[in-house]
Image: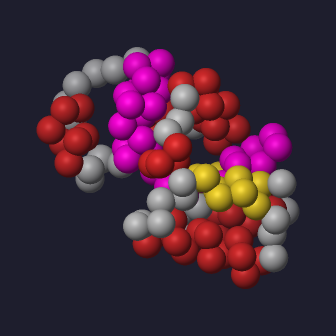
Amino acid sequence: MYRIYHNPRCKKSRAGLNYLENKGVDFEKIEYLKTGLKPEELEVIFTKLNKNPSEMIRKQEAIYKSDFRGKQFTEEEWIQIISEHPKLLNRPIIEGKHKAVWGDPVENIDTLLA
């Protein structure tokens, strides 16, 4: 089964959700802004994405601009920051058993489903 880390208020996240639905894929929807993400969960996600946390930051968010822009953080610190401010995480992320992808554009999801 797949998981989609989803924000229903985000156009790109809704597009990813619709893409999975249209493909007939069995998935679990996780509204991570409501449930939160523990640092350990984020570590697994980033490992499956094969990306550093700093590569998955939404730099257009107000909290990024006010609190984090221009500052240097380790990847471990970014994990903690994202855990405390999950709005900073790029979305949607679709996670499989051994791999995950960022669903922007939605066609990226096909690399996970193949």
Residue 12 drawn above or below residue 55: below
Point 30% across, 47% down: residue: 59
Residue 80 shown in magenta? yes
> Where in the figure is residue 54, as x and y percent of width and height?
42, 34
- Quarter holding the N terminus is bottom right
Residues 50 and 61: in front is 61
> Residue 26 occupies which quadrant of the picture?
bottom right
Residues 60 and 9: in front is 9
> Where in the figure is residue 83, as x and y percent of width and height?
45, 31
- Quarter holding the C terminus is bottom right
> Where in the figure is residue 88, as x and y percent of width and height?
37, 44
> Residue 113 occupies which quadrant of the picture?
bottom right
Point 55% across, 74% down: residue: 15
Residue 46 drawn above or below residue 89: above
Magenta region, residue range: 75-100
Asked if residue 56 shows in the view, the reply is no
Left or right of 25 in this view: 46? left
Asked if residue 98 shows in the view, the reply is yes
